[in-house]
């Protein structure tokens, strides 16, 4: 049975209880680390970012009892922002992704918020794909071209196009599953 962080643990964390922090850390660290790794595409970089996130959780612990209604959502948003900021600092984020970083217009509507978060994750993952795979994916999904047309345009075989799409979709599914596991 999976351990779930409840409001009592978060309240104890906000009061400075180190065992509550340890429980939060043990539950969320693997999820956050994997989620960040899928965004930044570098395990060592992701570990550094994840450690910084948990330092901030400890430093900001007092606000959790009052200001944060859903700790899981909070740490997910914090992780996403930390990964995006790290990519910005290193210059590894493209203009395509930069354009999607504006906050949601209707943040009070939870469904709209999560839909926008999902869209952002998709765009970030697509931007981080190898160039050829990204081109194939964008031509297929955004331009609506069939596999044969993509193959002809890029000078690839139809099978290569299919392989690129399979790998792209597998990567997207994994990133979205990581996102969902953080929200659960």
Image (cartoon, rainbow, N blue to C red):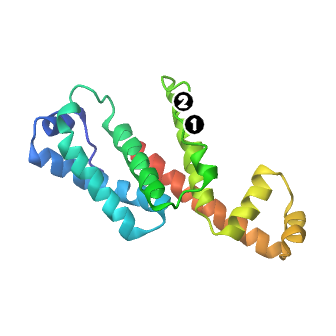
Task: Kindly indicate the quadrant of the structure image that contains residue 69.
Answer: top left
Q: Is 111 or 131 nearer to us in this picture?
A: 131
Position of residue 112 measured from the top left corner of the image (x, y, whole percent): 56, 30
Residue 99 shown left or right of residue 26 in the figure: right
Which element carries disc 1, helix, strand or loop?
A: helix
Q: How many numbered circles are shown?
A: 2
Left or right of 157, for residue 50: left
Which residue in the structure is indicated by mark 1?
115
Q: Quadrant where the C terminus lies?
A: top left
Residue 89 occupies quadrant? bottom left
The image position of residue 45, as x and y in percent, is 38, 66
Is the C-beta separation of discs 1 and 2 under 8 Å? yes
Residue beneath the point at 38% across and 63% down: 46
Image coordinates of residue 2 in percent, x first then y, are: 30, 50
Q: Residues within 10 Å of mark 1 (few under 14, many from 20)?
A: few
Tell me if residue 22 can be seen. yes
Q: Which residue is mark 2?
A: 111
CA–CA distance in space, label 1 to label 2: 6 Å
**Of 129 and 101, the residue lying toward us:** 101
In this picture, is 97 found above or below 11?
A: below
Q: Residue at x 64, y 51 (%)?
A: 96
| On screen, residue 49 above or below 161 | above
x, y (%) of residue 164?
71, 69
Closest to the observer: 67 or 98? 98
- Crowding around mark 2 (Cα neighbors within 10 Å: few <14, some 14 to 19, many 20+) is few
Residue visible at 78% across and 70% down in the picture:
161
């Amino acid at each position: 049975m999976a351990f779930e962080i409840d409001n009592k643990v978060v309240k104890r964390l906000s009061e400075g209880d180190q065992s509550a922090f340890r429980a939060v850390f043990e539950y969320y660290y693997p999820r956050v680390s994997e989620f960040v790794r899928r965004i930044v595409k570098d395990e060592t970089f992701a570990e550094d970012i994840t450690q910084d996130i948990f330092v901030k959780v400890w430093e900001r612990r007092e606000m959790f009892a009052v200001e944060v209604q859903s700790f899981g959502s909070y740490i997910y948003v914090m992780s996403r922002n930390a990964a995006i900021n790290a990519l910005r600092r290193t210059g590894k984020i493209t203009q395509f992704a930069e354009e999607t970083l504006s906050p949601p217009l209707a943040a009070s509507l939870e469904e709209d918020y999560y839909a926008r978060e999902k869209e952002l994750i998709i765009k970030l993952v697509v931007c981080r794909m190898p160039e050829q795979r990204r081109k194939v994916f964008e031509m297929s999904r955004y331009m609506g071209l069939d596999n044969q047309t993509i193959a002809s345009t890029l000078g690839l075989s139809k099978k290569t196009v299919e392989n690129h799409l399979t790998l792209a979709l597998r990567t997207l599914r994994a990133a979205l599953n990581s996102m969902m596991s953080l929200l659960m």
